[in-house]
Image (spheres, rainbow, N blue to C red):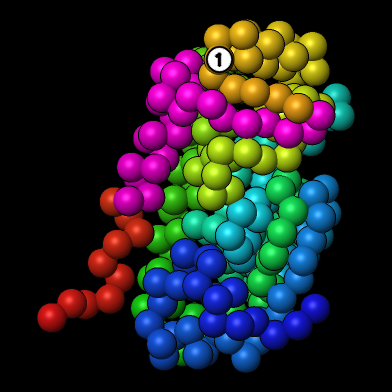
Amino acid sequence: MSTPTPDDLANNALLATLSDADRLRLTPHILVFDLDANHVLQHAGDEVTDTWFPCGPAMAAFCVVTKEATAVDVALVGREGAVGGIVSNGHVPAFATAQVRYGGRFLRIKTAALEQAKLDSLTLRHWFSRYSDCLLAQVFQTAACNATHTISQRTAKWLLAAVSRTHGYRFEMTHEQLAEMLGVGRSFVTRVVTRLRDAGTIETKRGVFIIKDEQRLRRAACDCTTMIEDHFDTVMHGIYPTD
């Protein structure tokens, strides 16, 4: 745990885009943590006392557990966003568990400090409201995707989502973790991964995925990732006036 450097703040898009004045409102309240995969940022039912900003290749996910004890990831959050109090106004109970999927650096600010900063700055309020809209859009699209697309399409979609958030074509993930993200059995994922590997789309090593042909992977995926990326590009612009 330490205080953030300018590079830390630059490695999260929500913070990097802020004006100097708005960033200074938040910086004194931010601490830096290096977290491993599977670390739980918040449990469902907990008060949301913290907001976490993934930096660089770090990635987290919102996960919903059903009565049958099946866990399904409903949204991935990487350096483009934040987890926790960013989408609530105060210490309301969390509906979903938030868990680190790809370990790395996370910046933490207490929800109370963030809420005070948002009260002091209209642009901060608007900026984080826009991000909340984008995160909600991802949840909506995931619900539609789970209902209409095949496991093969969804597997390719999540692999693309991981690529876009981890700065590269190689990332650590087991078949079990991918199956949990999709809410399906490991055997289903193994069959899909085997087909993608045999086609030369990906390569796998023990606990590691390597994307060999991103364009082929995009053709194998549904268009949900592209739709969400387009929505982010549309909504997350123009918060500050330009000359």
Residue 112 versus residue 194: which sits nearer the camera? 194
Q: Is the magenta stretch mostly helix, strand or loop?
A: helix
How far across and down, in percent of the image, does residue 66 sit? 79, 31
Q: Quarter of the image for the C terminus: give it.
A: bottom left
**What is the quadrant of residue 228 in the picture?**
top left
Residue situated furthest left in the rendering: 243
- Reply above or below: 35 against 108: above
In percent of width and height, residue 238 lies at 26, 67
Which stretch is magenta? Answer: 206-233
Left or right of residue 228: residue 140: right
| Residue 88 in view | no
Residue 143 in the image: above or below residue 52: above
Amino acid at the residue labelled 1: Gly
Q: Residue at x 67, y 46 (%)?
A: 61
- Inspect this view and state whether residue 132 appears: yes
x and y, in percent, of residue 171 in the image: 67, 40
Image side of residue 83 versus residue 34, left or right: left
Crowding at dot 1, Cα within 10 Å, few <14 / some 14-19 / many 20+, comes out as some
Q: Residue at x 54, y 82 (%)?
A: 6
Q: Quadrant of residue 29?
A: bottom right
Q: Residue at 48% across / 84% down in the picture?
A: 23
- Disc 1 designates what residue? 200
Q: In this view, does 161 lie above or below 55?
A: above
Is 226 covered by the magenta stretch?
Answer: yes
Is residue 242 part of the magenta span, yes or no? no
Q: Residue at x 79, y 61 (%)?
A: 35
Residue 84, image x, y percentages: 66, 62
